[in-house]
Amino acid sequence: MSEKAGEKDKGKLHKVLGAGIGWIVAGPVGAVLGCLVGHTLEKNPELLDKGLFGHNLKAYYDVLQVPYNTGPQEIRAAYKRLAQKYHPDRFADTDPVIQELAKGKMTEINEAHARIMDSMKDA
């Protein structure tokens, strides 16, 4: 199956799921609204990746273990605390699996910090 056909089937799935959930929640009007949401997702699949305003920052706040919309000073403190805890150099003499997990966690922490701080610069 081609990639284009897969995307088309995915859009149909969004419509069917939206209509089904809408019907359960709000009857025929909900089904129509659910179908419209599915149609919107079919035409704009990037909406699932981005979030409401083009950013899905909540996941990054979760990585840093701080409440959503925390200020820059608290974010820096959380980043520093987590970096000290998960930095791969702290696991230098242990199992290679643990080293890889620490590297992966540190990558997540770095990305979360960078994305949140970039979004604050843009605001």
Image: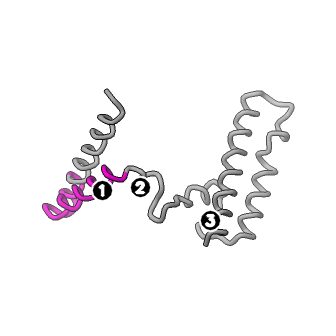
Give the colour scheme shown. Answer: one colour
The residue under the point 78% across, 57% down is 81
Q: Quadrant of residue 76?
A: bottom right
Q: Of helix, strand and loop, which mostly describes the magenta segment?
A: helix
| Image location of residue 64, percent across then percent down | 67, 57
Q: Mark 2: few, some, or many residues within 10 Å (few <14, many ≥20)?
A: some
Residue that badge 2 annotates: 47
| Image location of residue 5, percent across then percent down | 29, 34
**Eyeballing the image, is 55 above or below 15?**
below
**Eyeballing the image, is 110 above or below 4?**
below
Q: Amino acid at mark 3?
A: Ser
Could you say whether the residue bearing mark 1 is in a helix, strand or loop?
helix
1 or 3: tag closer to the N-terminus: 1
Task: Describe residue 12's horizontal placement relative to residue 82 as left or right.
Answer: left
The residue under the point 22% across, 62% down is 33
3 or 2: tag closer to the N-terminus: 2
- How many labels were placed on the picture? 3
Q: Which residues are magenta?
A: 20-44
Q: Alpha-carbon distance for marks 1 and 2?
A: 9 Å
Dot label at residue 40:
1
Is residue 88 shown in magenta?
A: no
The residue under the point 62% across, 69% down is 122
Q: Amino acid at mark 2?
A: Leu
Task: Describe residue 71's horizontal placement relative to residue 28 as left or right.
Answer: right
Cβ–Cβ below 8 Å for labels 1 and 2? yes
| Image location of residue 19, percent across then percent down | 20, 53
Q: Mark 3: few, some, or many residues within 10 Å (few <14, many ≥20)?
A: few
